[in-house]
Amino acid sequence: MTHATEQLVPPAPLRARGLRLAGVSLTLGDGDSTVVALDDVTLTVPPGELLAVLGPSGSGKSSLLAVAGALIAPSSGAVHLDGVDVTGLKPARQAALRRERIGFVFQSGNLLPALTAVDQLRFALHVAGMRGTPDRDPRALLEQVGMGHKADRRPHELSGGERQRVGIARALVTAPALLLVDEPTAALDRARSHEVVELLAAETHDHGVATVMVTHDHDVLEHCDRTVEMEDGRLGA
Amino acid sequence: MFLALRELSFARARFGLMGGVVALIAVLVVMLSGLSSGLVNDGVSGLKKLPVTDFAFGEGTAIDSAFSRSTVDRDQLERWSAQDGVADAALFGNQLVNAEGPHGEPVDLALFGVEPDSFVAPTASSVVDGGTLDRPDQIVVSETVADLGLGVGDTVTIERLGTELTIAGVLDGQHTFGHVDVAYVPLATWQEIHAGVPTGERARPEVYDEATAIALTAGPDVRIDAAAGDTAATTTTVSLTESFDGSPGYAAETLTLELIQVFLYAISALVVGAFFMVWTIQRKHEIAVARAMGASNGYLVGDALAQAAVVLVVSTAVGIGAGTGLGALLSSTPMPFELEAGPLAVAAALLVGLGLAGAAASVGRIARVDPLTALGGQR
Ligand SMILES: Nc1ncnc2c1ncn2[C@@H]1O[C@H](COP(=O)(O)OP(=O)(O)OP(=O)(O)O)[C@@H](O)[C@H]1O
Ligand SMILES: [Mg+2]
């Protein structure tokens, strides 16, 4: 596992740290009914920045996360993470990159029902092959997101906001370079939404993570460092 | 196994149900295996224990009735004795008879007619009680006659003929043929009984030339050339194992039981396959999440197979344990039931192996789950 990480991180002088999308387009669908989900998107997110992505439904926000997170290859353009061209990697290498360098926070948490909160974090470490020397201690991390007292509860015993916090802790436990967050506050009330986004901002700043957060919620933008709008696959100001 | 074991304890009711089905099938397989072994022993243990490699029957004898229909004579025996590769050859008589015990109770016997000095006759070392054959009115019987209350010194009387035969010795272990106890009897006496000659009378001279088959034994590391011998002696020769089909009901019984077992294995594999198919489909979203997190196909498929293996091994072990316990109760009844370690080990391996194959066919779907579906809402 360690040699894989070395291959994915180039020597220091070449490093352009954080996430870089250069002229990325993504065409979805097959044959005659194709949709341009991303249209010539260029974007840089340096480490320690929390970027909010706004935009109407269908504008390509989730597609942006999928391309940035090496879940789908762009039709054209390049995606670099800490200087490594992600688009050129084989699927198995992309999976390795995801488990070692990228954290996902999905809408409504998407925790595994069979696992307790602390096991959700341990699973992420296990998948990443980091069981021996975790970069961040699962229980301490749960404590940090305010879930220490419910570390041994399963998802069905947690509220929506609590699940979201466990999901954030799970994404952070492998100490990723890039954190991709899809509508984290969709299922939460105002107070909870603020708590969750404040938590994301704090983690982003304290650990130098490049974070992209998709949201519909204008209320929480005050915690973000920068905001971009998407419209028909294009990036606005 | 990280996820596998935690899912097992989380969804224990579902896995318990599936494991229960496998365990019950394992119980049934044990029962059938015991019944098979029991029936095989009841049908042919007398033949199995003969120091014989092949039987030569009269020419053209159909194997399923060979022991009751075939006739051979001394002339054929001589020609077989002269064949290459034959270490020893002897006349062998076989007839099922109804007899009466000392108190008039019915006793069914399979009379094996042998010349007392031939290689098929009971030897002193195979007898645990009494002695071997040395008078024409003596028999040496299977240990299982004890179940009928008979022992050394008791006399049985052949029905209709009135021939009285005294038990001279009891053999070590079960010797049965066609579900009936074997009684070795001197060939001349067998020939008289077979010809239906009442006690005390002499039969026509040619009767003393005849028997059911020629028992053959090959020399060490030699195979008997059945075709050459059959041409020379005008016989039809089969191996000892093939001759088992000549035991009444043997072929039908074993075939039926084997067929039921094949179906049970197939059902078990299908149940396990169907369970893991549904289980995998139910977990589709979780699998997508795990794959988006970067879990490889090998990791997820290996985890699912390990999970299947744990369920299969535990439920098969429980089922075989329970079946063996039940079988111990059955063994003490007159039912032909015998548990043998070999067939049980094979049954356990088949249940686990075929179950894993069924699971493998289903969990292959994991590789087709698109990690993209983890993004966005619940679709
Ligand atoms: N698998 C697919 N095949 C074809 N078209 C797709 C597929 N997934 C998404 N699209 C289309 O791509 C465009 C962008 O979709 P995307 O999911 O990125 O939007 P979004 O901004 O995340 O919307 P929402 O706010 O509703 O989540 C939409 O027009 C959508 O219909
Ligand atoms: Mg979306």
Image: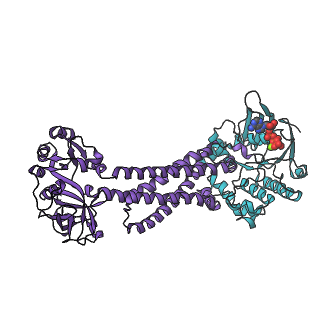
In x, y percent, where is residue B135? 11, 64
Asked if residue B236 can be seen in this view, the reply is: yes
Answer with left or right where residue A75 lies relative to residue B78: right
In x, y percent, where is residue B291? 66, 47
Answer with left or right where residue A163 lies relative to residue B266: right
Quarter containing ligand 1?
top right
Q: Quadrant of residue B307?
A: bottom right
* Residue nearer the viewer, B196 or B371: B196
Say if A108 sits above or below A236 in the image: below
In x, y percent, where is residue B117? 11, 58
Coloring scheme used: by chain
In x, y percent, where is residue A45? 79, 43
* Residue nearer the viewer, A218 or B8: B8
Please name the residue shown 75% across and 55% down the image. A167
Answer with left or right where residue B190 lies relative to residue A89: left
Q: Quadrant of the C terminus of chain A?
A: top right
**Numbered label tally:** 0
Say if B264 sits above or below A79 in the image: below
**Quick one: which chain is purple?**
B
Chain A visual colour: cyan
* Residue nearer the viewer, B218 or A15: B218
